[in-house]
Amino acid sequence: MQSHFGWVDFAGENQRKMLDVVKLFREHDTRDELGIGTIRDAFSDYFFPGTSTIQTKVRYMLFIPWIYNMLEEKKVKYPEIEDRARAEEIKLIYALLEAGEYEGLIGRDARDKLIRLPSAIYWTGLESWGIRLFPGSRDQYHHTLTENYYRRRRSTSGQSKPNWDPGLPEPPEKLMEYAELNLRKEDAEYLVDRISCRQNDTLLYYLIDKGEDIDADFFWYLPVIKELPLKLQENIKHARNFSETIYGANLMYNYLLSKQVKNDSWIEGYKKGLESWFEVISFRWTDLKNWYNNLNNLWTSEALINARIPLSSRNFVDQWYDILFQQEKLDNILQSDKVEKLLKNREWRLKRDRARLLNARAREMWGGASGTIPLDYRWSTVKNIISDILNGLSGEESKIA
């Protein structure tokens, strides 16, 4: 029988309740305390290939090849290329500052002392979108440039394989003197072309292609989701269910730590968060229980089937669900010895002597919150990327040509 996922869950009310939970811990962090990062990243890469949480503005997908094409035209060789490329990326910081760009500017504060350059942040994405044709690492690219120049000189056909997509739009004049983070229309059209050629079965592509409002805290709340191919809807449903249900384990981890350090304010805060979370999943209990009863569909979903998820991570998730879906009341979870044992064992396996639930000295360094934001699979970053592209397509571009 063909699987089918329904989306009727009184979305407006359920969405409001879930966002109320998020607001309780909005200022806290997203650290992966329970070792579910491989599952999170597999979903993220499936939906939004080429992205990462530390990316800011999508025009860096053009800045990097523009800089390297310029250096290749000048035949800059190894080992000079590394220093020259860094100098140009630092120069770009000042060109962006000259244009008054601050929001999304990488190196805004560090400037010349910047350690992680934009090229390092966007390198993988450049290949994923078909902009970088060289298949190796940035270091490998630097090392092979001299040989690459030699091959081009020796080529009689003039068809030596380029390192960057030949269709890349021309950079603006005086780019390294005055640069903007907004896309020109031609930039946006080029990026859409690359994504449609290389990633046209992904959520990233469909959201750009449909060009509809993407203002939602989680992408599964977008009305357009109901119009997507069934395969994609199925994986979105898995991602949503996993995010909303595993969130309770993270809140319980923080709740148990709060009890151990005897901080009444934190205890009350996490108890309130757990109450709101349990109300949310209770609202969807029938749907979630059916999902749990067919949990192998999660592990064999298209998003996860080829992911290298450690067996220990899968076992932890399975055990958490076995406990969760046998409960009818939150108090049973709060007072469950099985939950406490499961979380302690999981943290010990991951951290050994640094496990806070088992080591008083490790708890001394705890600031009261660890991993308290629900999984959104990079959505907070991807929303900005999509908005940049859609704004560029609509002509809301930079002030300069």
Image (cartoon, rainbow, N blue to C red):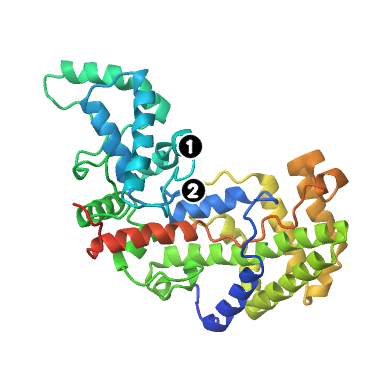
Query: Looking at the image, can residue 59 be seen?
Result: yes
Q: Residue at 39% across / 44% down in the picture? A: 125
Counting from the top left corner in percent of width and height, residue 236 is at 49, 64
Quadrant of res 24: bottom right
In the picture provided, is 153 more to the left or to the right than 56? left
Q: Residue at 30% across / 55% down in the picture? A: 182
Assess whether mark 2 and mark 1 are in contact (beta carbons under 8 angstroms).
yes
Counting from the top left corner in percent of width and height, residue 66 is at 26, 38
Q: How far is disc 1 from disc 2 in space, using C-alphas?
A: 10 Å
In the picture provided, is 91 more to the left or to the right than 331? left
Query: Looking at the image, can residue 130 be seen?
Result: no
Residue neighbourhood size for the residue with mark 1, other residues' Cα within 10 Å, grouped as few (<14), some (14–19), many (≥20): few
The type of residue carrying mark 2 is Ile
Any mark on residue 54, and which? 2
Residue occupied by mark 1: 116
The type of residue carrying mark 1 is Arg
Q: Residue at 20% across / 26% down in the picture? A: 160
Counting from the top left corner in percent of width and height, residue 232 is at 43, 63
